[in-house]
Amino acid sequence: MTLKGTAKGAVANKNGAFEIKNIAPGTYTLSTSFVGLVNQQQEVEVTNQTTTEVYFVLNENKEQLEEVIISGHKSKNATTTTVAKMPLKNLENPQIYSSISAELMKEQVISNYDDALRNVPGLARSWESTGRGGDGGAYFSLRGFEAQPALVNGLPGLVSGNLDPANVEEIQVIKGPSGTLFGASFYGYGGIINTVTKKPYYDFGGEVAYNIGSFDLHRLAVDINTPLSKTKKLHFD
């Protein structure tokens, strides 16, 4: 409750009662507001040494109670073939894993592999890639243990530096002991990180992206896919 033209007001209790004291005689406009209800105003005349009673009945605000439309999308990959080593649907897979799709990386304008992994809960970067041959990419802490992007398409694929997400279709972070499905030599107690690269398709297509940002960021990415044979047995991406 606010008394227009003054600094006075009040908050109604759970029963709707309110009180504003020490008002000089005169005519005022009393305004009420509440979330989800229509605001109301009343002219109130205050006389000396008397108590003026005012009653309000607030109606629902239809404009604020209209339907809310939530839009979203799901990944086109409905199965977890690489993660589970079996063609299981996502809901059928009992493993604990996080998936970062290429669509999500495009929406977030991600140009760095390590930045993409910020979407994975429970995963934190320990230190950046050293750039040494055979040392792989950056090191991460996963469930308290060391983890590294050591797998590409489910096979050992250590690199000498950070990967470029331009050719990445999906990043899979498999948590816990289920990572032993990929071999003990590349398994960490906390889990593993598997990178799925883009695969060529039978038709001609592609996309061009140009990103510009702070710190003099200019990034041009060109992705072209084309069949190399008329029989559609050889493709290039």
Image (cartoon, rainbow, N blue to C red):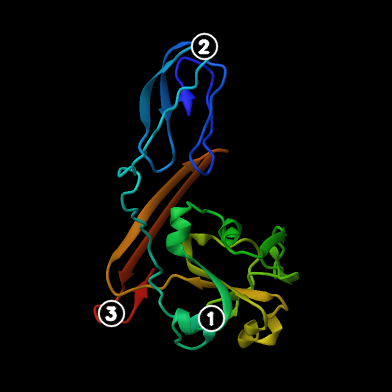
For the C terminus, the quadrant is bottom left
Task: Look at mark 3 in the image and give the residue it sits on.
Answer: 232
Residue 83, which numbered label?
1
Q: Amino acid at mark 1?
A: Val
Name the residue rendered at 31%, 68% in the picture.
226
Whether residue 222 can be seen here: yes
Q: CA distance from mark 3 to mark 2?
A: 89 Å
Q: Amino acid at mark 3?
A: Lys
Q: Quadrant of residue 143?
A: bottom right
In the image, residue 174 lies at what x, y percent? 60, 76
Name the residue rendered at 35%, 37% in the picture.
38
Residue, far front: 50
Q: Is residue 151 left or right of residue 34?
A: right
Q: Residues within 10 Å of mark 3 (few under 14, many from 20)?
A: few
Using the image, determine if residue 31 lies above or below residue 61: above
Q: CA distance from mark 1 to mark 3?
A: 28 Å
Q: Identify the secondary structure beneath mark 2.
A: loop
In the image, residue 12 lies at what x, y percent? 52, 36
228 or 92, which lies in front? 92
Q: Is residue 70 left or right of residue 81?
A: left
Q: Nearer the viewer, mark 1 or mark 3?
A: 1
Name the residue rendered at 72%, 68% in the picture.
135
Q: CA distance from mark 1 to mark 2?
A: 75 Å
Q: Earlier in the sequence, mark 3 or mark 2?
A: 2
In the image, residue 43 lies at what x, y percent? 36, 20
Q: Amino acid at mark 2?
A: Ala
Q: Quadrant of residue 116?
A: bottom right
Q: Earlier in the sequence, mark 1 or mark 3?
A: 1
Q: Earlier in the sequence, mark 1 or mark 2?
A: 2
Q: Residues within 10 Å of mark 2 (few under 14, many from 20)?
A: few
Residue, far left: 230
Task: Look at mark 2 in the image and give the residue it sits on.
Answer: 24
